[in-house]
Image (cartoon, rainbow, N blue to C red):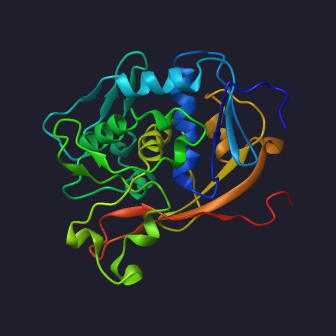
């Protein structure tokens, strides 16, 4: 266990890749408010040292203006998270295979609309707590509160329930709306801007590693790739899985431990 005191401590299931990269996203945003922010995993928790507090960070996240930078591209426009973060999200526009495989939304799903819906839902007081990544709610359109918005499908608790062959009917085809984990969805979108999983050598199959020592955001990509030696405590492998028969929409599935990581 690190001797560094944690200002923020949240519950995390590291076998859920959405939650893992959401932790990376939370650290990314915290580091843009304070150079003292360092993050690390400790059992079933993710910790951030320094400033700000979780309540203050969530308040800034949920009030920061989101801007769709390409008004002609409603489905995949880059998104600017404005002050106090000034962070441009555009990793899915890089054109490489990894970005394509990690981009779980497709078709008529609108990245900006989904991000704003998740952000708006996170204004509920439940999100400023250690259960941030486990708060489940139906998300509504920030501009049309009567309209429900489905998430990106980064949260691996959703993936196995998305395909008709697994649940006996097609939630997508029936237009069903289900409970989302807004913090996982939005913060994972943020986390993947800097931190990417490593290809496991097969299409849509990826590895990532947790670390146990406090690290700044600049070192997190290397740690998450398992390249910082003793800081890596365990590796995990997951699939970005086709969740519809059209093989366009994807979802992150639960990760499995990579055996013999320390050998």
Against 57, residue 79 (above or below) is below
The quadrant in which the C terminus is found is bottom right
How many marks can you see? 0
Q: Where is residue 80 in the image (x, y as percent from the top left)?
A: 32, 27
144 relative to 253 in the view: left or right: left
Against 17, residue 243 (above or below) is below
Q: Where is residue 196 in the image (x, y as percent from the top left)?
A: 53, 46
Q: In which quarter of the image is residue 235?
A: bottom right
Against 202, residue 43 (above or below) is above
Q: Position of residue 229 (x, y in %)?
A: 80, 44
Q: Which residue is drawn at 68% across and 26% down?
A: 38
Q: Which residue is drawn at 53% across and 45% down?
A: 133
185 relative to 175 in the view: left or right: right
Residue 196 in view (yes/no):
no
Residue 14 in view (yes/no):
yes
Judging depth in this view, the residue of 53 and 263 nearest the camera is: 53
Q: Where is residue 157 in the image (x, y as percent from the top left)?
A: 49, 62
The quadrant in which the N terminus is found is top right
């Amino acid at each position: 266990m690190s001797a560094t005191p944690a200002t923020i401590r949240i519950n995390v299931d590291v076998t859920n890749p959405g939650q893992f990269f959401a932790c990376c996203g939370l650290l990314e945003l915290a580091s843009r408010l304070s150079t003292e922010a360092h993050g690390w995993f400790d059992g079933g928790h993710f910790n951030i040292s320094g400033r700000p507090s979780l309540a203050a960070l969530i308040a800034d996240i949920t009030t920061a203006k989101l801007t769709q930078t390409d008004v002609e591209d409603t489905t995949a426009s880059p998104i600017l998270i404005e002050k106090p973060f000034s962070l441009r999200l555009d990793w899915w526009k890089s054109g490489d295979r990894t970005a394509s495989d990690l981009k779980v939304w497709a078709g008529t799903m609108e990245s900006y609309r989904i991000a704003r819906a998740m952000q708006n839902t996170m204004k509920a007081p439940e999100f400023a707590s250690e259960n941030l990544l486990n708060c489940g709610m139906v998300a509504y359109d920030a501009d049309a509160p009567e309209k429900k918005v489905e998430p990106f499908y980064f949260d691996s608790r959703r993936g196995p329930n998305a395909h008709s062959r697994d649940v006996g009917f097609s939630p997508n085809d029936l237009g069903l709306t289900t409970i989302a984990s807004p913090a996982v969805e939005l913060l994972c979108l943020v986390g993947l801007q800097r931190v990417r999983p490593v290809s496991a050598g097969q299409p849509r199959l990826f590895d990532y590693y947790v670390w146990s020592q406090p690290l700044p955001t600049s070192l997190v990509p290397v740690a998450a790739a398992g390249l910082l030696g003793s800081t890596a405590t365990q590796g995990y492998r997951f699939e970005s899985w086709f969740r519809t028969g059209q093989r366009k929409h994807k979802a992150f599935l639960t990760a499995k431990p990579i055996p013999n990581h320390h050998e």
